[in-house]
Image: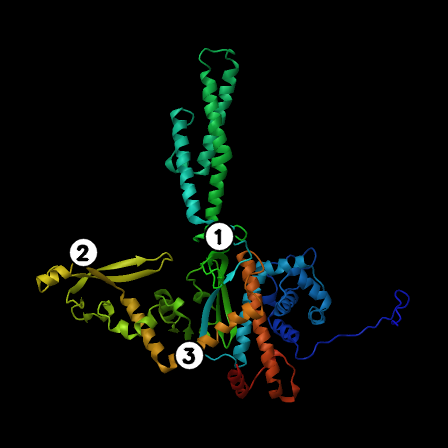
């Protein structure tokens, strides 16, 4: 026996109001976005005519909740607006197409707005005692781009082929000048696209003149027509210029503009650069298109982030808005450079807890007892000279400056072995196998920073703070890649990818904050509403949270 099944004959419409629980994440997202001032949310230069735009606050709420539920597709977010009751409550029962959603999260206004949300989130954490003023933790990771991993373009290959094209163009120019088709041009004009276009126009004019002259010739000429041979030669050069050289030159120049100092880019996503990833199943260091993501965290909350196309060192510290809240900046040895130390100590007056590359190596007994290291040589500060383990004296020779590819200048001191040592044996030891005088380079500024950082890292306070780096910033990347599944970006283009990553990190912050509030709910008095303005006003509760995390 089956149940009675009748369709289309009777309908019973039940209207009801749906309300989400008080401890639901959508309430936290709703309260947080509404705490941002309207002048920050709204766009400055907005059109006053036409169809009204979707409110940025509502779009931001929708995206944050969708990302917190690991929903990144525009079409799936559109379905979420129709089928998910908490999302409908958050969106006030509005519905948007995936075009509207995708256009918003790719826009420049969304980029500025997402960056501002981290500022207000940091201020909220500071107001409610969830940020201590001791240290901020910085780290980076590579995120694979949404691009074909075999659609690469390498700068060295483009430069090589472009140079060959210029040589071919120069040879064609020499032939045209020799045949008196064109006049001489400036050297820089010959290899440019304008010069190639000018050569093609002059050849076309000459071919047109030859056509007119050939029409006046008799049909049969003994030995053949000289004009026809000349026309055949010029048509070949014209075809070569118009169909091969000029299009390739335009392509190479367009590609060289895309590089912007990088060594490669992806044809699928021009802002993605090929770099080594930690996920390397074949164990062959295969390069994949990706982006360089850097974050600043405290108590596993992301306070700021930045996305770069360059896989090497990046100026993240200069754009970090919350640097004034902290006295120490903690990072791994990848950030231990003279540029970063100079920026933190001299420009921002912050204490870096950042080991340099050889810090761990210099702590070992083998390094300290190695007599060949200049750090272990005898130094006379009064007369400014070194004596190595063989007894060779190196006196100050001259100053030197070195500028790296990022424009940072380093001041070096060169010490050269004295020509006349205390014995003939030392005179021979003072020379290289090529019979030149040995010399060493010393960077006093770098040595000063190394000594200062070594002293800070060796102190009890420095050890305690640096130890926290392992369980403060590293778990954030683990949650982002494992729990949120963001091992690869969902959009293309640096601005769109930066917005995508920013939404993911903010959703991660709000998810963590929502769980923390639910854990601390029993400590709140009189069942206060779970809103941001009532969040943790007791120092005892803050300490309980820090112990639990």
Please give left or right for residue 196 compared with residue 499 in the image.
Answer: left
At x 63%, y 79%, the residue is 531
Q: Which residue is mark 3?
A: 465
Question: Distance between the Cα atoms at labels 3 and 1?
Answer: 39 Å
- Describe the element under mark 1 as helix, strand or loop: strand
Q: Nearer the viewer, residue 150 or 499?
A: 150
Residue at (16% x, 67% y) in the render: 390
**Number of numbered discs present?**
3
Q: Which residue in the structure is indicated by mark 2? A: 433
Earlier along the polypeptide chain: callout 1 or callout 2?
1
- Vertical relation: 241 (above or below) 273: above
- Of mark 3 and mark 1, the one earlier in the sequence is 1
Structure colour scheme:
rainbow
Residue at position x 43%, y 46% in the image = 157
| Residue 265 image label | 1
Look at discs 3 and 1 and give the one toward the viewer: 1
Closer to viewer: mark 1 or mark 2: 2
Which tag, 2 or 3, sits closer to the chain's start?
A: 2
> At numbered mark 2, what does the secondary structure look like: helix, strand or loop?
loop
């Amino acid at each position: 026996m089956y149940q009675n099944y009748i369709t289309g004959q009777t309908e019973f419409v039940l209207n009801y109001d749906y309300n989400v629980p008080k401890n639901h994440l959508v309430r936290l997202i709703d309260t947080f976005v509404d705490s941002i001032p309207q002048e920050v949310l709204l766009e400055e230069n907005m059109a006053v005519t036409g169809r009204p735009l979707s409110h940025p606050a509502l779009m931001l709420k929708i995206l944050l909740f969708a990302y917190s539920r690991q929903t990144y597709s525009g079409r799936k977010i559109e379905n979420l607006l129709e089928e998910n009751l908490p999302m409908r409550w958050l969106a006030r029962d509005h519905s948007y197409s995936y075009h509207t959603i995708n256009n918003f999260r790719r826009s420049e206004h969304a980029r500025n707005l997402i960056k501002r949300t981290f500022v207000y989130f940091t201020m909220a954490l500071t107001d409610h005692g969830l940020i201590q003023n001791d240290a901020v933790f910085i780290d980076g990771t590579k995120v694979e781009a949404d691009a074909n991993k075999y659609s690469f373009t390498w700068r060295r290959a483009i430069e090589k082929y472009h140079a060959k094209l210029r040589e071919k163009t120069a040879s064609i120019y020499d032939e045209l000048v020799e045949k008196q088709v064109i006049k001489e041009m400036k050297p820089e004009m010959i290899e440019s696209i304008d010069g190639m276009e000018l050569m093609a126009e002059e050849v076309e004019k000459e071919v047109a003149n030859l056509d007119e002259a050939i029409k006046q010739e008799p049909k049969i000429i003994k030995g053949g027509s000289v004009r026809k041979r000349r026309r055949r030669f010029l048509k070949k050069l014209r075809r070569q210029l118009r169909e091969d050289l000029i299009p390739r030159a335009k392509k190479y120049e367009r590609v060289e503009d895309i590089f912007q100092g990088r060594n490669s880019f992806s044809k699928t996503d021009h802002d993605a650069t090929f770099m080594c990833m930690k996920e390397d199943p074949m164990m062959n260091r295969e390069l994949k298109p990706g982006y360089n993501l850097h974050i600043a965290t405290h108590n596993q909350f992301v306070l700021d982030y930045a996305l770069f196309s360059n896989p090497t060192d990046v100026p993240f510290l200069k754009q970090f808005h919350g640097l004034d809240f902290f006295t120490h900046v903690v990072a791994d040895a990848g950030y231990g450079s003279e540029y970063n130390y100079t920026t933190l100590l001299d420009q921002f007056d912050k204490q870096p807890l950042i080991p340099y590359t050889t810090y761990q190596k210099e702590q070992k007994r083998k390094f300290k007892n190695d007599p060949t290291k200049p750090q272990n040589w005898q130094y006379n500060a009064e007369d400014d000279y070194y004596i190595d383990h063989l007894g060779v004296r190196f006196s100050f020779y001259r100053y030197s400056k070195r500028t790296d590819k990022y424009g940072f200048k380093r001041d070096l001191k060169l010490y050269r072995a004295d020509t006349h040592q205390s014995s003939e044996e030392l005179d021979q030891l003072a020379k290289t196998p090529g019979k030149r005088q040995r010399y060493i380079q010393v960077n006093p500024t770098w040595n000063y920073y190394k000594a200062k950082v070594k002293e800070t890292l060796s102190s009890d306070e420095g050890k305690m703070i640096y130890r926290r780096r392992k369980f403060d910033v590293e778990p954030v990347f683990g949650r982002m890649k494992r729990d949120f599944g963001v091992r690869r970006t969902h959009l293309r283009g640096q601005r769109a990818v930066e917005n995508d990553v920013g939404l993911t990190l903010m959703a991660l912050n709000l998810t963590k904050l929502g769980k923390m509030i639910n854990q601390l709910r029993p400590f709140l008095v009189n069942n206060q509403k779970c809103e941001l303005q009532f969040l943790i006003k007791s120092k005892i509760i803050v300490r309980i949270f820090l112990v639990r995390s």
